[in-house]
Image (tube, rainbow, N blue to C red):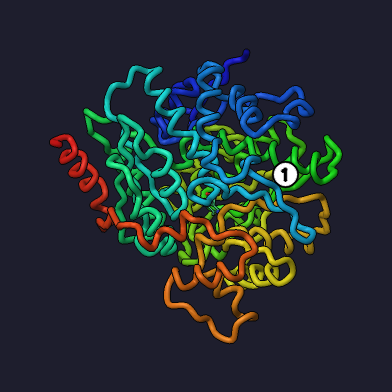
Amino acid sequence: MILTQYVSTRGKADKCSASQAILTGLANDGGLYVPEIFPKIDNLTHLLSLSYQDLAINILKLFLTDYSSDELKSCVYKAYDEKFDSQIIAPLEKRGEYYFLELFHGPTLAFKDMALSFLPRILKLAAKKHDINKKIVILTATSGDTGKAALEGFAHIEGVEIFVFFPSEGVSSIQKLQMQTQAGENTHVIAVNGNFDDTQTGVKKIFLENHLENVYLSSANSINIGRLLPQIVYYFSAYAQMVHRFGLKEGDRINFTVPTGNFGNILAGYYAREMGLPIKTLLCASNDNRVLYDFFTKGDYDKNREFIVTTSPSMDILVSSNLERLLYHIGGSEITAELMDQLSKKGKYSFLTEKPGFAANCATQDESNEGIRRMYNDNGYILDPHTAVAYVSYRKYRTETNDFTPNIILSTANPFKFPESVCKAISQQNFSKVNFQDAFGALEILKKLSLSPAPSQIMNLKTKKVRHSIVCMPDEMGELLFKILALDALK
Ligand SMILES: *Cc1c(COP(=O)(O)O)cnc(C)c1O
């Protein structure tokens, strides 16, 4: 077995093992950990015949080489169990002529569950391997879905405290309630008066300025390589389903369209391709915050622009952290360090080098609403606002390029997480007026419109107790965290 080592994208931190990279989160030169080389698959046919769990074990063992196979097995089987309401874990659905990979069958109904069901276990083991006896504190900034998925993943895990910071006006009301009602003595949820970038910057600052002696800080954000790796698996699973259920010839290349925010999901697709999965193009779909669209089409990354609040909050992002990893894989660490320096000083950089195998498109708010309506009217299938951005972007891409390669749209959330926006989008044609008072009113309408059952995790929220209601300013985040931890220590 070849050992897979991890290096920093900025080239100034020591190489380390997988468990060390997972434990550390951010490298000490400010960079992100990436595998030094991509392991290659040697038997695609065999991989495609496996269950989701066995596929995960076979992919992850190539990356997590300092975990024993028993450790991996146990983590994988505990992560992908009945918490998911589909045995396939990530079922591929065909609606009309479109394929959707449904990544929302986990406990919090968003694709973040795919990685965050797994990360807590592998992180806990990493701490054990490296004799960390301090309390582990997980810090997470969220634009909605990560927070809840991280809370679910880490709740009740002994020796771990989890803190989730979310932008107070930047998440849907259901997402907010999902987080604020989270159970578990070790869970902490704090609203920040600012947008997602303020929140993410605040968390990064706590990491860089951390002087806490008695706790070990780590992250559940997608800067952690342990978030990225489990996401590679569903690209293989999607391909397997194309072959076994939809008649794709094994070896033929397919495209994926990915609704993108922090660039973690699509980057996992890039890793799958580097490992040898036959993928032709990864289409990066953006909403009105189209920094990535501009980057891929013009070569300029520029975050100096208006931040637009859309109905797809997990894509309302101007600094896509994981893009740094792609820059490294294409350009190397020196260039990456230089570009990241420009990004932090000027908020922009230029990277004109070709990005082979990537394409980009985008959808405005109106276009995505229309996409939801169209898919519903044509196929009775309800898209969440993020998936709608991908669906519209794919249609535009296909018209513009005539690329009719089979394409899978990654469907990243259950529409019931965004009832108001989804109802409004559909109702323009189906109802004379939108008739709901709040999220729960919208849920009732959605229940009537939907052919799928309404998820109990959402319907139950109405009667759940709000346990977390603290609000702070971005520059108070660190202080608040220390206060809460200090109080906890007194208990
Ligand atoms: C997180 C998220 C995205 C964006 O994924 P990235 O990995 O950040 O690019 C898209 N849709 C939904 C529903 C999400 O939760």
Circle 1 packing at 10 Å, graded few (<14), some (14-19), many (20+), is: few
Spot occupied by residue 291 in the image (x, y as percentages of width and height): 55, 57
Answer whether residue 91 is visible to the viewer in this image: yes
Spot occupied by residue 78 in the image (x, y as percentages of width and height): 50, 31
104 left or right of 237?
Answer: left
Which quarter of the figure has residue 367? bottom right
What residue does disc 1 label?
A: 357
189 left or right of 360?
Answer: left
The number of numbered discs placed on residues in the rendered structure image is 1
Name the residue nearer the viewer: 389 or 361: 389
Answer whether residue 300 is visible to the viewer in this image: no
Image point 48% across, 60% down: which residue? 313
Name the residue nearer the viewer: 279 or 33: 279
Local SS, label 1: loop
Spot occupied by residue 139 in the image (x, y as percentages of width and height): 35, 41
Q: Residue furthest bottom?
A: 432
